Amino acid sequence: MKLMKTKDDSYTFFNEKYQEAYHSLTGAIEEAKKKYIEPLEVKEGDVILDICFGLGYNTFAAVEHTKNIKVIGLEIDEEILKDLQELQINEKYEIIKQLAKEKRYKDKDYDLTLIMGPAQETIKTLQEQFDIVFLDPFSPRKNPELWTKEFFQDIFQRMKPGAKLATYSCARAIRENLRAVGFIVKDGPSVKRRGPSTNALKSL
């Protein structure tokens, strides 16, 4: 995969299969913080589902932001988990590297698990109920199986009442699919782009 530097000086990779970068080139780590951590108000004690773990930046941003969290990440591609070992960010990212290698990381502050396989299948095996969901697949055009009503229903069923989801896409069809399974949908922040991201709530 091709390593690419983004405008906040963090790095991402370009995936040849999907012909897309893993993150916005305006700033990969900035995107994780401003589209996921901040609007979802990630806090101590949260149980988080990180769909399409990739380089682990969303989980990394959560680990940097707070403690006493549990994260389950879903990922299909072993190659990106190997490639991220090249990145040198800080001490907290070393946690992500260990998780990517061992598929498990646990200490007094963090309980992190990585499950390999197609997310539309592995999500069906999860028994946890989640407070927070990061939905970060490749675009609906390139990765349509992770933007369907059926997949959103599986996510919805595994969220606690009052739980929140964020994704970068604001496509009308995506929002319609979210609403169709019961989510309350609203605009998320715009981060150096014209359109907003999307936040969705499972009502109490």
Image (cartoon, rainbow, N blue to C red):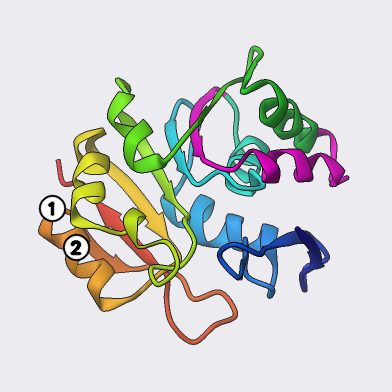
- The answer to whether residue 28 is left or right of residue 170 is right
Q: Which of 175 and 66 lies nearest the eye of the viewer?
A: 175
Q: Do the residues labelled 1 and 2 touch (CB within 8 Å)?
A: yes
Badge 2 marks a residue whose secondary structure is: helix
Residue in view at x 76 percent, y 34 percent: 92
Work out whether 167 lies above or below 71. below
Name the residue beneath numbered marker 1.
181
- The answer to whether residue 59 is left or right of residue 95 is left
Name the residue beneath numbered marker 2.
177
Residues drawn in magenta: 68-91
Kind of residue indicated by mark 1? Val
Residue in view at x 47 percent, y 56 percent: 137
Badge 1 marks a residue whose secondary structure is: loop
| Neighbourhood count class around disc 2 (C-alpha, 10 Å): few under 14, some 14–19, many 20 upward | some
Kind of residue indicated by mark 2? Asn
Compute the Cα span from label 1 to label 2: 7 Å
- Tell me, yes or no, whether the highlighted magenta stretch contains residue 87: yes
In the picture, the quarter occupied by the N terminus is bottom right
The percent position of residue 53, horizontal first and vertical second, equals: 56, 43
Quarter-wise, where is residue 159 in the image? top left
In the picture, the quarter occupied by the C terminus is top left
The numbered disc on residue 83 is none
The percent position of residue 72, horizontal first and vertical second, equals: 48, 29
Quarter-wise, where is residue 171 in the image? bottom left
The percent position of residue 111, horizontal first and vertical second, equals: 56, 19
Residue in view at x 33 percent, y 36 percent: 121
- The answer to whether residue 143 is left or right of residue 7 is left
Q: Which residue lies furthest to the front in this view?
A: 17
- The answer to whether residue 198 is left or right of residue 201 is right
